[in-house]
Amino acid sequence: MIEIEIDMCLELVKAFITLFVVMDPPGNVPIFIAVTRVMGREARKRELNHAVVVATLLLLLFAFLGKFVLDVLNISLDSFMVAGGILLLLVSFDLLREHKYLMKETGRGIGAVPIGTPLLAGPGAITTVMVIIQSRGPFVALFAIFSAIIATK
């Protein structure tokens, strides 16, 4: 009995750590600061909350419907990861050039893109939750998603 509980706790911790590392919230802090530099404190909080909600919804959606969606579209998980990586690269280049995603005048509208997705809920995080739910079940996947999001905020 105790051995089963310890095994379950280890599975929960491993799933959380895996998703947290893939989401890389500490690595996204400089990007968040850069794209919100013209905002006040309240506006930053609002955009962060928006990003967290978007990331949570995307991860939940793909955890439970991701395999179905990819199957319907005839897209393999590997192809999805490659395409998502390319998208993330393009967004990164735009951020480096302070182009499309930096709203220089108002600084608004960056919560969903690029912070919520693809930075927090990018192809790596989406793929990770899809693998977790298939290999470890929905309880572990939900725990990983919500604990990683709480740790991010």
Image (cartoon, helix red, strand yellow):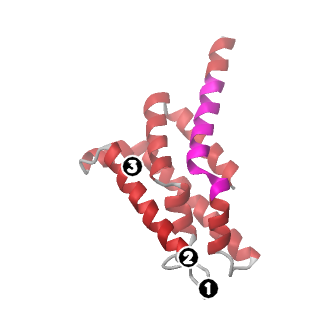
**Residue 24 belongs to the span the image colors magenta:** yes
As measured in the structure, the alpha-carbon distance from the residue carrying label 3 to the one carrying label 1 is 33 Å
Name the chief secondary structure element in magenta: helix
Q: Quadrant of residue 109?
A: bottom right
Which residue, given by chain and number where applicable, does mark 3 sit on? 81
Give the mark nearer the N terminus: 3 vs 1.
Answer: 3
- Which stretch appears magenta? 8-27
**Residue 17 belongs to the span the image colors magenta:** yes
Which residue, given by chain and number where applicable, does mark 1 sit on? 106
Please name whichever residue, 57 or 126, is drawn nearer the observer in this view of the structure: 126
Image coordinates of residue 6 in percent, x first then y, are 67, 19
SS for tag 1?
A: loop
Residue 143: tell me if it is visible.
no
Disc 1 residue crowd, few under 14, some 14–19, many 20+, Cα 10 Å? few
Disc 2 residue crowd, few under 14, some 14–19, many 20+, Cα 10 Å? some
Residue 109 is marked as: 2
Left or right of 77 on screen, residue 42: right
